């Protein structure tokens, strides 16, 4: 058994997991190297275009460090690949006296069980039945009405990052406070300032409500928009499956190693923009590292000029977020992951698949995507609709 992984497993107390889950994860990382229980362990899912030629193959070696099998996205009711691009614009239901759009969103809270890695289930509390919740997107100055209804078994709130009056802050015990099961409340404020923000539940105990899954992206476009780009929302999250105040599975958009199994298709030369948010509980720092490229970074997304240029790693504490921009230079598969090796091994690692224009359709098809995903990734902005190249 790989000694390093063995230490990880014992430190994280995987025995607290259900039998199926424990077997799946331990099998994922370890059984490829040993002889035991091979029959009961599913074979690693081959990455598109990958060959399994033997020990000398770098990709193959990496696959043995991965979670194996696939999560049933249909049963979950959401797909991390779609979460990259599925913005929720709400419904424009009128305009203010000054002529600004009124955008309305319907958000509910509820209790669901989600599969966060093959065979590993987590009892989540969720906004609109998904973790993370819907990626709320609007333009600076839009007047927002968030109609929140609690269908869960616990009191919850919606606390948005951004300027707003105290009554709309969504904090337990203040003003309207937590919304009890069966009750509802409308949060109403102007979208301000533009940036890459987030919302989350602020009911007590806070760390429990957050790590259970109650958070989502809140993206406010600047007046005039940003330059056209292929845009993705990445929520760095993690799950404490045995409630020992430490995370067992780490991910972007909930499902561990999902983007290893399905590399994200991008085109050589195009501008790629990532709205990156860190919400993980229990660990102080998360990070994002991109292989073979350098990117510009806009801290909190509240400026139009980068706050960091030409970096390949950034770190975020809980609640921090920012925008990354880069252009793929050469075709090929490029990793992105937390530069905290433990997080990467426990799920927070993925690939971009950079291809030339002519090969893009095939790259989409390889992982079951179509033109609609391509269109959504190129047309996220509420302000400026970029041309689809
Ligand atoms: Cu809550």
Image (cartoon, rainbow, N blue to C red):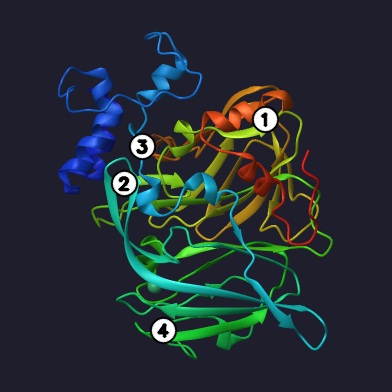
* Residue at the spot of label 2: 248
Q: Closer to us: mark 4 or mark 2?
A: 4
Element marked by disc 2: loop
- Tag of residue 263: none
Sequence-wise first label, 4 or 2? 4
Residue 36 placement, left or right of 133: left
Cα distance in 3D space between marks 2 and 3: 18 Å
* Residue at the spot of label 4: 179
Front-most of 114 and 298?
A: 114
* Residue at the spot of label 1: 293
| Whether residue 352 can be seen here | no
Badge 2 local density, few (<14 within 10 Å), some, or many (20+)?
Answer: many
Dot 4 and dot 2 residues touching (CB under 8 Å): no
Q: Closer to us: mark 2 or mark 3?
A: 3
| Whether residue 252 can be seen here | yes
Q: Closer to us: mark 3 or mark 1?
A: 3
Cα distance in 3D space between marks 1 and 2: 29 Å
Cα distance in 3D space between marks 4 and 3: 36 Å
Element marked by disc 1: loop
Q: Position of residue 66 (x, y in %)?
A: 37, 30
Sequence-wise first label, 1 or 2? 2
Q: Residue furthest bottom?
A: 175
- Tag of residue 70: 3
Sequence-wise first label, 4 or 1? 4
Cα distance in 3D space between marks 3 and 1: 29 Å
Dot 4 and dot 3 residues touching (CB under 8 Å): no
Residue 226 placement, left or right of 171: right
Q: Position of residue 241 (x, y in %)?
A: 27, 52
Q: Residue at x 80, y 58 (%)?
A: 225
Looking at the rendering, the quadrant in which ligand 1 lies is: bottom left
Sequence-wise first label, 3 or 1? 3
Quarter of the image for the C terminus: give it. top right
């Amino acid at each position: 058994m790989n000694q390093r992984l063995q230490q990880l497993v014992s430190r994280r107390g995987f025995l607290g997991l259900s039998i199926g889950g424990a077997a799946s994860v331990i099998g994922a990382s370890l059984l490829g190297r040993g002889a035991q229980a091979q029959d009961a362990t599913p074979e690693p899912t081959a990455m598109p275009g990958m060959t399994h030629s033997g020990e000398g193959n770098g990709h193959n070696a990496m696959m043995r460090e991965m979670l194996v099998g696939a999560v049933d996205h249909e049963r979950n009711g959401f797909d991390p690949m779609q979460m990259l691009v599925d913005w929720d614009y709400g419904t424009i239901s009128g305009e203010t006296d000054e002529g600004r759009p009124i955008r309305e969103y319907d958000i509910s809270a509820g209790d669901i069980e989600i599969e966060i890695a093959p065979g590993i289930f987590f009892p989540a509390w969720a906004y609109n039945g998904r973790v993370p919740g819907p990626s709320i997107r609007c333009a600076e100055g839009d007047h927002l009405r968030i109609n929140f209804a609690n269908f869960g078994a616990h009191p919850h709130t919606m606390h948005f990052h951004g300027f707003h009056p105290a009554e709309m802050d969504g904090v337990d015990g203040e003003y309207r406070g937590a919304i009890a099961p069966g009750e509802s409340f409308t949060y109403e404020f102007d979208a301000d300032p533009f940036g890459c923000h987030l919302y989350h539940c602020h009911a007590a105990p806070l760390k429990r409500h957050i790590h259970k899954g109650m958070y989502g992206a809140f993206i406010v476009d600047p007046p005039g928009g940003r330059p056209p780009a292929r845009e993705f929302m990445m929520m760095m999250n993690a799950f404490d499956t045995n409630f020992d105040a430490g995370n067992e599975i780490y991910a972007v958009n909930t499902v561990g190693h999902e983007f290893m199994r399905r590399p994200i298709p991008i085109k050589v030369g195009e501008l790629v923009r990532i709205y990156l948010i860190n919400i993980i509980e229990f660990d102080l720092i998360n990070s994002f590292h991109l292989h073979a490229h350098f990117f510009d970074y806009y801290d909190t997304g509240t400026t139009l000029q980068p706050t960091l240029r030409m970096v390949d790693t950034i770190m975020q504490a809980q609640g921090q977020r920012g925008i990354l921009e880069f252009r793929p230079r050469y075709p090929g598969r490029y990793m992105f992951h937390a530069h905290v090796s433990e997080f990467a091994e426990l799920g927070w690692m993925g690939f971009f698949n950079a291809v030339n224009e002519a090969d893009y359709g095939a790259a989409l098809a390889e992982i079951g995507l179509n033109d609609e995903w391509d269109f959504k990734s190129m047309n996220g902005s509420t302000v400026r609709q970029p041309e689809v190249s």
